[in-house]
Amino acid sequence: MLVLLSPAKSLDYASTLPTRKHSEPRLLDEAAQLIAVMRTKSLAEIAALMDISDELAALNAQRYADFEVPFNRANARPAVLAFDGDTYRGLAVRERFGERDFTEAQKTLRLLSGLYGVLRPLDLIQPYRLEMGTRLATERGASLYDWWGSRITALLRDDLAESPGAAAVLNLASGEYFQAVRPAELGAPVISPRFEDTDANGRRSVVSFFAKRARGELAAWVVLNRVRSPRAVKQFTGAGYRYDARASTTAQPVFVRAFENRG
């Protein structure tokens, strides 16, 4: 079983690394070609393309300029330890993972990326921002979805064949990133959990911040407990969520949390 996560805009290249293990992105040549395209863009073009401020455009233009291969521990760090958004705070690998857990995560977790395509947790990455939904025109089309085509799906399909347990994809990525995957070509069922919070009046809804944290919590739970089957996912009770059988389907298990159980 493979677990899919989105990347994060927030990055951490300052904290101490809890492991020396690392690997090289398998689509690094493709990433280098995208960097070459981004290096041709002016600051104004980067700002408009990514809908960011001039200050952030300048930061990312410098990141594109600084991009260099080969990657090593001096100029890059493992993706799961570089991303620092809500999902990765829910994942909390620094606090939870030992060396064997990092090894397990390498078999089980896959991080989708606009620049790198598909990352294993220990794949080294350099600082970047390039979201999957970016309408970046290249020789392959008008967007990054066109750029990646079937490449991401093909690599995930290969990883599924080698992953432990049942052949299934636990999709914890956002819609923007999962759109880069072609489910019909995976050759395995896709399970996309939904996390709902109940407010003080009993109304249920998906709260983005809480849902992102819960996705990270669930991904960590799968790794730490060596979960091999999508059927076992309904046993997840992290962060106060409980499986709701009545609201769930096979493809979309629903987890709900009562207002008073928010941490």
Image (cartoon, helix red, strand yellow):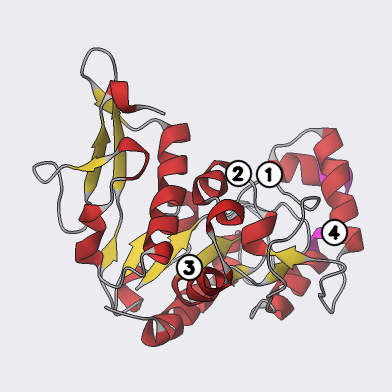
Q: Pointers 2 and 1 in contact (CB under 8 A)?
A: yes
Position of the C terminus, as image quadrant, is top left
Q: Nearer the viewer, residue 146 or 253?
A: 253
Q: Nearer the viewer, residue 57 or 67?
A: 67
Is label 1 in a helix, a strand or a loop? loop
Q: Which residue is mark 4?
A: 64
Distance from the alpha carbon under mark 2 to that under mark 1: 5 Å
Q: Pointers 1 and 3 in contact (CB under 8 A)?
A: no
Distance from the alpha carbon under mark 1 to that under mark 3: 19 Å
Q: Which residue is mark 3?
A: 109
Q: Position of residue 44 (x, y in %)?
A: 84, 40
Tell us which disc is closer to us: 3 or 4: 3
Q: Amino acid at mark 2?
A: Gly
Left or right of 80? Residue 60 is: right
Q: Position of residue 223 (x, y in %)?
A: 42, 65
At label 1, counting other C-alpha atoms closer than 10 Å, the crowd grade (few under 14, some 14-19, many 20 or more) is some
Q: Residue at x 76, y 73 (%)?
A: 33
> Magenta stretch containing residue 10, yes or no?
no
